Image (spheres, rainbow, N blue to C red):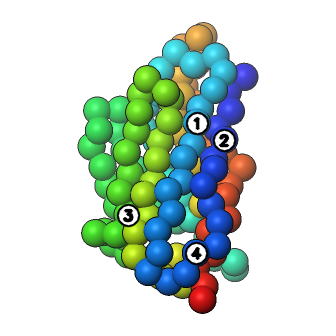
Amino acid sequence: QVQLVESGGGLVQPGGSLRLSCVASGTIFRINGMGWYQQAPGKQRELVARISSSGSTEYADSVKGRFTISRDNAKNTVYLQMNTLKPEDTAVYYCNAGIVNMKLQNYDYWGQGTQVTVSS
């Protein structure tokens, strides 16, 4: 059984910062790519940022220069540092990871989501 648990969301004023964390737990052999997605009300889930097992990163154009994704492989954790937040960043943020279990089966996992609200 593998779980992804996010934390760090909340209410912040425009221009503020938040740091999201996502911890993977369970019977894990290896974690491949990890990423963060956002879903605003009435919209589809979209990629925000992702990071490979070797540390290569990719960002949505809307967050380049403001958000930074990183991971701590020893802790099975991925982070999203969000700076200079804007009202349009308001969404539920989901963690995603490709995880190989002890049976060497590769599955795609999602966290339960954490709400980020940017408002004055």
The residue lying furthest to the top in this view is 103
In the rendered view of the protein, which quadrant contains the C terminus? bottom right
Mark 1: secondary structure: strand
Q: CA distance from mark 3 to mark 4?
A: 15 Å
Q: Look at mark 2 in the image and give the residue it sits on.
A: 5
Q: Are marks 1 and 2 in contact (CB under 8 Å)?
A: yes
The label shown at residue 67 is: 3
Residue 7 screen position, x and y as percent: 63, 50
- What type is the residue that disc 3 sits on? Phe
Q: Are marks 2 and 4 in contact (CB under 8 Å)?
A: no
Classify 10 Å Cα crowding around label 1: few (below 14), some (14-19), many (20 and above): some
Q: Earlier in the sequence, mark 1 or mark 3?
A: 1
Q: Are marks 3 and 2 in contact (CB under 8 Å)?
A: no
Q: Earlier in the sequence, mark 3 or mark 2?
A: 2
- What type is the residue that disc 1 sits on? Val
Residue 28 screen position, x and y as percent: 57, 19
- What type is the residue that disc 2 sits on? Val
The label shown at residue 23 is: 1
Q: Earlier in the sequence, mark 1 or mark 4?
A: 4
- What type is the residue that disc 4 sits on? Val
